[in-house]
Image (spheres, helix red, strand yellow):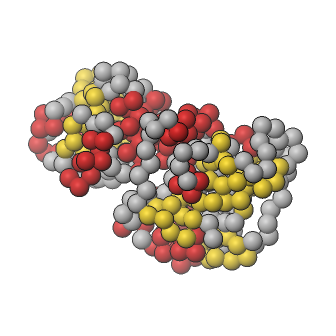
């Protein structure tokens, strides 16, 4: 079978599209025929070796943390799934493997795929969906009626955070470029504002807020300015560097390290199928272009789904 792998850490040039042996599922595992994966910024960090000390991975490594596909074979002791089932999963960062024709997955990590969208498009859901879910409900513990500021609201994770927070009953102010305003309003954002002028302070955008969620990579000095956007006793949750706490005002801070969770993913799938959660996909590109996608990591127009060959 074909797969993209890297044999050493480095630039996008280390990615090779090559023949490898098709894996065989062991006990508790399934073999999935891949329909699609997607590109996530962490893929770039893994390939470059930035996370090598944190994640015990073995080389060669097949990138692609997201998985959408169809079960091709069942290992021993697998129950609840059949060959031909459409599934999604967030694969373990240390092993990944979605950029291939087939991938092994632990059955316990799989969730039935949404039936209201194309299976390929479902490849955009797992990591970003879980990141949004864990930010909204675990880190921020968003409650009905709370005021929430989402900085970087039109991105892959931010778009889902806005929708989940609105669905939880929060009053959301979404921050992003003007060309994304209509889409953010369609998600239910109460207010949509242009990128923050941090020096202007929170009052300029209707703050401070009980919850601030940041997805924009800024300097440590700018992260520190975001603390003032959090109301007394509130929380700042970030996927792009820690926002400092203010203990005198009771302002807490939390950073996300997303994890695979099949039960949470099943709830996200249910929301997609109920029409309560929309995925914004900017591009579909074949897996043979994965090296070029990695090379363009900082210039991609948005969520890029990587379609299996």
Residue 267: x %, y % from top left: 55, 33
Q: Residue placed farthest to the front in the image? A: 116
What is the quadrant of residue 28 in the picture? top right
Q: Is residue 247 above or below residue 117?
A: above
Please name whichever residue, 286 or 235, is drawn nearer the observer in this view of the structure. Answer: 286
Please name whichever residue, 223 or 186, is drawn nearer the observer in this view of the structure. Answer: 186
Q: Quadrant of the N terminus?
A: bottom right
User: As drawn, is 193 to the left or to the right of 120?
Assistant: left
Please name whichever residue, 71 or 228, is drawn nearer the observer in this view of the structure. Answer: 71
Q: Quadrant of the C terminus?
A: bottom right
Residue 59: x %, y % from top left: 69, 66
Q: Inspect this view and state whether residue 77 appears.
A: yes
Q: Residue placed farthest to the right in the image? A: 76
**Residue shown at 77% from the left, 42% from the top:** 81
Q: Is residue 224 above or below residue 207?
A: below
User: As drawn, is 244 to the left or to the right of 68?
Assistant: left
What is the count of numbered marks? 0
Residue 16: x %, y % from top left: 62, 77
**Residue shown at 46% from the left, 29% from the top:** 137
**Residue shown at 24% from the left, 48% from the top:** 181
Residue 37: x %, y % from top left: 58, 59
């Amino acid at each position: 079978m074909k797969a993209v792998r890297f044999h050493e850490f480095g630039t996008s040039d280390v990615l090779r599209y090559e023949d490898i042996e098709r894996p065989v599922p062991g006990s508790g595992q399934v073999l999935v025929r891949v329909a699609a994966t997607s590109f996530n910024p962490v893929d770039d960090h893994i390939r470059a070796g930035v996370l090598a000390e944190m994640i015990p991975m073995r080389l060669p490594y097949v990138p692609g943390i997201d998985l959408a596909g169809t079960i091709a074979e069942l290992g021993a002791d697998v129950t609840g799934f059949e060959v031909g089932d459409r599934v999604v999963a967030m694969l373990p960062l240390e092993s990944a493997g979605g950029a291939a024709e087939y991938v092994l997955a632990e059955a316990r990590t799989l969730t039935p795929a949404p039936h209201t969208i194309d299976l390929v498009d479902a490849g955009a859901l797992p990591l970003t969906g879980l990141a949004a879910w864990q930010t909204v409900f675990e880190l921020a513990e968003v409650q009905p009626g709370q005021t929430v500021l989402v900085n970087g609201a039109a991105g892959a994770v931010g778009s889902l955070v806005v929708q989940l927070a609105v669905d939880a009953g929060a009053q959301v102010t979404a921050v992003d470029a003007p060309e994304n305003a209509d889409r953010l309003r369609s998600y239910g954002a109460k207010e949509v504002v242009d990128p923050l002028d941090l020096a202007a302070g929170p009052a300029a955008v209707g703050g401070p807020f009980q919850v601030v969620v940041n997805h924009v990579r800024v300097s440590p000095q700018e992260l520190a300015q975001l603390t003032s956007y959090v109301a007394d006793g509130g929380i700042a949750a970030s996927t792009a560097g820690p926002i400092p706490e203010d203990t005198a005002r009771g302002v807490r801070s939390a950073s996300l390290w997303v994890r695979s969770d099949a039960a949470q993913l099943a709830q996200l799938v249910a929301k997609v199928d109920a029409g309560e959660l929309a995925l914004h996909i900017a591009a579909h590109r074949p897996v043979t272009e994965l090296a070029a996608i990695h090379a363009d990591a900082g210039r991609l127009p948005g969520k890029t789904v990587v379609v299996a060959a």
